[in-house]
Image (cartoon, rainbow, N blue to C red):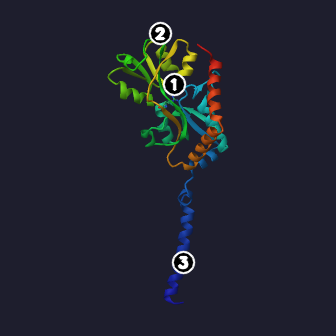
């Protein structure tokens, strides 16, 4: 053997040994592609959805103590499509994004609006609902316009787009009080007279004013049309794909419309006026 060919043989042997050792000693994640969130959910057998269960008819806790509402029905469909069980975590609305980013939950389904600020932190599905802002007052109130609110106290849910709107349009003109939970805390505050009006979405306002006969819709806020979408962590493309397919199907088959109608009807029937 020539010196050159000896070097070649030694080189090959060294290469094989090193290659083998690298394979043995490196953690599998360094060799294999990182497991996707969808794969992780499938392995776990459970989809963990975060919501803020204070917003009927989208999400609330029913009289049996179960999570119920439009968003919960959508969550069930997604879990079904993935082929896993569903776990709901009730989290303060303004802590949902941090919970999603921290991996505590896989999705946020909370009638959440995909705003530019939120888009910087998480991804959003396609839109599944659209709504407008509405002020609710007690029946005896004479408030019927934004100007009527000047000098009054209004309630908003902490960290919502309603909160943001109030800060932008009413700061310095009204006293803005924030609440963690709309139902029951912010509604009770209105009933007690701690605030003169609360700002929520029209769908939620319609249900609440039908249940609470001492409350009414004062007025709808012009130019506040906004949408709801499901928040997905960044870089979870395969999970987002499943979520979008489910929403797409619920919309195109008319099933979403049925879910919305039956969830509203169920809520009004079961709990009645109080
Ligand atoms: N759409 C509004 C937002 O994204 C309010 C959503 C409130 N949701 C709830 N589950 N409390 O800020």
Mark 3 element type:
helix
Residue for badge 1: 202
Q: Quadrant of residue 58?
A: top right
Whether the residue under disc 2 has CB within 8 Å of ligand 1: no
Which label number is shown at residue 269?
A: none
Q: How far is disc 3 from disc 1 in space, using C-alphas? A: 73 Å
Residue plotted at (47% across, 31% down):
225
Q: Is residue 95 in sight in this rendering?
A: yes
The circle drawn on residue 140 is 2
Give above or below for 112 relative to 188: below
Res. 105 visible in picture: no
Secondary structure beneath dot 2 equals loop
State how far apart marks 1 and 2 are (Cα): 20 Å
How crowded pointer 2 is (Cα within 10 Å; few <14, some 14-19, many 20+) is rated as: few
Can you identify the residue that label 3 sits on? 12
Describe the element under mark 1 as helix, strand or loop: helix
At x 49% / y 87%, what residue is drawn?
A: 4
User: Farthest top residue?
Assistant: 140
């Amino acid at each position: 053997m020539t010196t050159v060919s000896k070097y070649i043989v030694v080189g090959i042997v060294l290469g094989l040994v090193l290659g083998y050792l690298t394979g043995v000693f490196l953690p599998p994640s360094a060799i294999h592609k990182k497991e996707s969130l969808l794969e992780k959910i499938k392995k776990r057998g459970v989809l963990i959805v975060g919501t803020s269960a204070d917003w009927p008819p989208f999400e609330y806790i029913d009289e049996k103590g179960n999570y119920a509402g439009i968003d919960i029905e959508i969550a069930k469909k997604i879990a079904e499509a993935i082929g896993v069980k569903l776990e709901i975590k009730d989290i303060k609305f303004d802590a949902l994004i941090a919970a999603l980013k921290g991996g505590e939950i896989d999705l946020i389904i909370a009638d959440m609006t995909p705003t530019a600020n939120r888009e910087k932190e998480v991804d959003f599905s396609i839109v599944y609902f659209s709504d407008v802002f509405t002020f609710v007052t007690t029946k005896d109130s004479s408030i019927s316009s934004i100007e009527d609110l000047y000098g009054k106290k209004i309630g908003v849910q902490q960290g919502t787009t309603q909160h943001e709107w109030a800060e932008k349009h009413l700061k310095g003109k009204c006293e803005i009080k924030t609440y963690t939970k709309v139902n029951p805390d912010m509604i009770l505050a209105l009933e007690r007279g701690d605030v003169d009006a609360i700002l929520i979405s029209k769908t939620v306002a319609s249900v609440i004013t039908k249940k609470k006969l001492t409350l009414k819709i004062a007025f709808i806020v012009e130019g506040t049309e906004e949408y709801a979408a499901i928040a997905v962590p960044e870089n979870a493309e395969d999970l987002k794909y499943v979520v979008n397919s489910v929403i797409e199907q619920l919309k195109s088959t008319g099933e979403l419309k049925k879910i919305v109608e039956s969830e509203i009807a169920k809520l009004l029937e079961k709990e009645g006026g109080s």
